[in-house]
Image: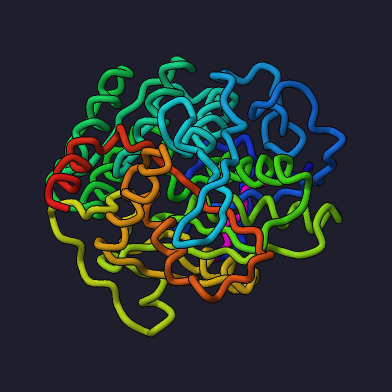
Amino acid sequence: MNANLICPACGTQYPEDDVVWRCRCGSFLDLNDTFTCDPSRFRGPENLKRYASVLPLRNPSSAVTFGEGFTPLHPMVFYGIQVMAKMDFLLTTGSFKDRGAFLMINKCRELGIRSIVEDSSGNSACAIAAYCALAGIRAQIFMPAGNSSAKTVQVRTYGATLHKIPGNRSDCARAAEEAAGESYYAAHTRNPYFLHGTKTVIYEIMEQSRWEAPDYIFVPVGSGSQILGIWLGLQEMKRSGVIGRYPRLVAVQSEHCCPLKNNREGKQTPELPASPLLAEGIAIRIPPRMDQILEAVAQTDGDVVAVSDLDIVEALQASALQGVYIEPTSAAAVAAIKQYNGRLKQSDRVVVSLTGHGLKASARMETLINTA
């Protein structure tokens, strides 16, 4: 494996052992990898270490872990459409972000990093704080002051130092970057190792589907760490001859913050309000990797969809009535399926990613239910 870090903006390369989180030109970095997908090498217990052959860890056997992975691929029905729901909200800290945190924090251990800074709307903060506690790494977490209290309590309980920043998500990111002068900036929006952790979800989906690729995958998108992880994994599988075609990737955002759709239409995304949006986990005004997200959608003949708060609440209730309690950000992906009613064939295999647990937003959920 050739595992240099490479800047997609200027082409500068850095050795993997360099403790660097961005290029000298200011861009994020990617991993210049040559991973080969060989399903016969996926052995052992059904957890993330199962995919060690496609993960950029030197010593995966010594990686710290909660034994996470293999969340259910559960049949559900939304708007009369049969789907398979990938229940990643059942990971250890209650969201799919555990996948990225597992790999990124274990890579920090390998590089000898003892202190990190991270900014997040909530789920990434929780995941990274938990894995830092497991790995013995000090964590400073920056979160918007108005976000869900359940997530801030979770972060503090893991022992991380929490900084609640007034303003919106962009204000939070600026504060964290300023603090990163003395610590490694483990930004899930930029870090390539985080993406290689999130790609494990598509490997699980494929194993659970007996290596038959779905026709559509609906994914809520903020910074894009899950959809880009899925895209990385799909490229590895196609390059290795494991799959012959790509599923269509459907990137879902809120109507209140839809930079992908605005980009396609040549519009600017307005500044976010200081108060958090209903789907706070995908309220990222300018995703650092927006061009890569749009490329993944284009290369898979996918789509960009924006959904209303009304449809998100409807999707929350439709999910709960089937016994599945998800947070509003996850429900956005479900709500997008409504726009495909009549466009999908009965034979289409549809996967929807349920990324975060409803317990993380119970106070807000109670208000929604009481006013519905």
Quarter of the picture holding the N terminus: top right
Residue 124 appears in the rendering: no
Foreground pick, 81 / 308: 81
In this rendering, the count of numbered labels is 0
Where 211 sits versus 107, above or below? Answer: below
Residue 131 position in % (x across, y down)? 46, 24
Q: Residue at x 43, y 80 (%)?
A: 264
Q: Residue at x 12, y 51 (%)?
A: 371
Where 35 sits versus 291, above or below? Answer: above
Where 178 sits versus 349, above or below? Answer: above
Tell me: 36 left or right of 273: right
Residue 121 position in % (x across, y down)? 29, 44
Tell me: 55 left or right of 94: right
**Residue farthest to the bottom?**
266
Q: Residue at x 32, y 41 (%)?
A: 119
Q: Which residue range is magenta in the image?
A: 4-9
Where 72 sits versus 277, above or below? Answer: above
Q: How is the image coloured?
A: rainbow
Residue 159 position in % (x across, y down)? 30, 17
Residue 39, image quadrant: top right
Q: Residue at x 46, y 45 (%)?
A: 354
Foreground pick, 302 / 120: 302
Tell me: 259 left or right of 166: right
Residue 299 appears in the rendering: yes
Foreground pick, 342 / 89: 342
Is residue 271 shown in magenta?
no
Residue 282 position in % (x across, y down)? 35, 54
Foreground pick, 7 / 248: 248
